[in-house]
Amino acid sequence: MKTKKTVACLGVAVLPLGALAAPEIYTIDPYHTYAHFEVDHLGVSRMRGRFDRTSGRFTIDRAAKTGSVELAIETASLTTGDNDKGSRPRARDEHLRGADFFNVAEFPRMTFKSTGVKFSGDSPAEITGQLTLLGVSRPLTIKVTRWVCKDNPMNRRPMCGGNGAGALKRSDFGMKYGIPAVGDELDLFFEFEGYRD
Amino acid sequence: MKDLLANPVVQSGVAPFAAGLAVAGLLIPLRLAGLAAGAGFLAAVWLIGNFGFAPLTATRRIVVLALAAPVLGALADLAFRPTRATAPALGAIFGAAAIWAFWSVLSQKDLPQGLVAAAGVAALVAWIVAFTASLQGDSVRAAAAGLALGVGTGVAAVLGASALLGQYGLALGSACGAFLLLVMVLGRRVAAGTTLALSASVAASLLGAGALLLAQLPWTALAALALVPVAVRLPLPEKSPAWLQAIVASIYSLAPAGAACFLAWQAGRGAGA
């Protein structure tokens, strides 16, 4: 009888720790998660653009120091700030959405699925995975440059988020138009926030 | 040299013209001068650097069909005697093939919208292919139609926000222009055959449909392009030399092509104003 009570007490005591150690699942907050890109233009400036719609989830298990990320970025939502044709036949954003670049009619989204997460202390520092763009999958490494977890001060919901950066060669994905006038190297930047499920 | 070959003017103008002229000139004795269109198109695809087939995107399917067309055309010229049913049959085949080419885009649309788009694209390709293929016995008209279809599709696609499809179209026009030049110099003994008529019509119609579905070419521009193989049938000065007939036929065919470019230009400006 005494043994049973001890086991029960231990069970009650251990349960919250077990719950803490379990992987936490977060759903991306689309209003505070954006993917940005930066590309060389004519060897002069580094032009920036943004994808306005991103969805996905990430998990983190701090005890096991593991995690995973799945992102879907709507390529049709890209903007570089030039969406007004003015007196020209087409605006730059229309051209970027067309078959020469992101080909959004045929490939309306690009996805990232992690294959591994490296930790630095308790925080994820580097995420490796596969980026699928224009039907081609290639490895991509995202360095996590900022990572914060806390309760949202407004709604008290637990959240994690931060910033990340990676780089790719667009020609690796078959996006060859305009190289080298429009650079082959594409830098990606992410700002992301997610709420725990 | 690398910079020269990377120049869009060389990729879609000079090189396809030279390839078309060389192939047409060399193959006149074999009655395969019509391979000029396919050779020019292939030169552009090669130089632009998109000669790959994985993943098999809509643009790459266009290339596959555009390269299959001259092979099929040459087979038709060498192995069969064209009948009245040949051109409509080829139109039907490539109309159906157009749905395959654009399936990845069409299948993502809502069912009614996808059905309308599929039917429209298939009808456009079938129409242009059938009406152009039936010109196989008339080198002047077939080459003039190819020139206008290529140039018209090319310029309209560029205005419709796809430079790549535009370059392919212009390359096709350049190669057909090279063939037409030979006809002007050597006369009607330079046979276009189903080879040229099919190559030009399949590539141009698919590029136009691609610019509609993958970029922003308005359907009205495609409707104007569809009039090219009809307009080129207007009466020619039959007793005049071939060079004069070629000029008149080119004027006929380039008129609707010019209208297509104007409509593409206007659509862009109107929507953005």
Image (cartoon, rainbow, N blue to C red):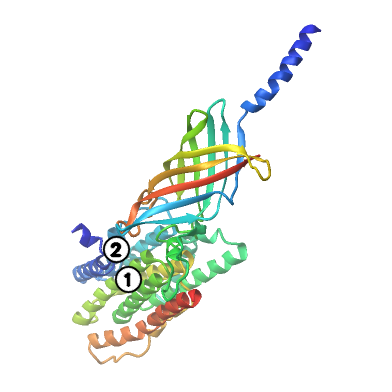
Residue A68 circle label: none
B49 above or below B38? above
The answer to whether residue B212 is left or right of residue B134 is: right
Residue located farthest toward the right when viewing the structure as drawn: A1
Q: Are marks 2 and 1 on the same chain?
A: yes
Q: Residue at x 42, y 79 (%)?
A: B260
Mark 2 vs 1, N-terminal side:
2
Query: Which amino acid type is marked by label 1?
Result: Leu
Tell me, yes or no, whether the two marked residues, 2 and 1, touch with CB atoms within 8 Å. Answer: yes
Residue B170 circle label: 1
Residue B44 circle label: 2
Q: Nearer the viewer, residue A6 or B175?
A: A6
Query: Which amino acid type is marked by label 2?
Result: Ala
- Image x and y of residue A14, in percent: 69, 19
The answer to whether residue B57 is left or right of residue B249 is: right
Q: Nearer the viewer, residue A197 or B74?
A: A197
Chain holding disc 1: B
Q: Nearer the viewer, residue A58 or B38?
A: A58
Q: How many marks?
A: 2
Q: Residue at x 49, y 50 (%)?
A: A35
Chain holding disc 2: B
Local SS, label 2: helix
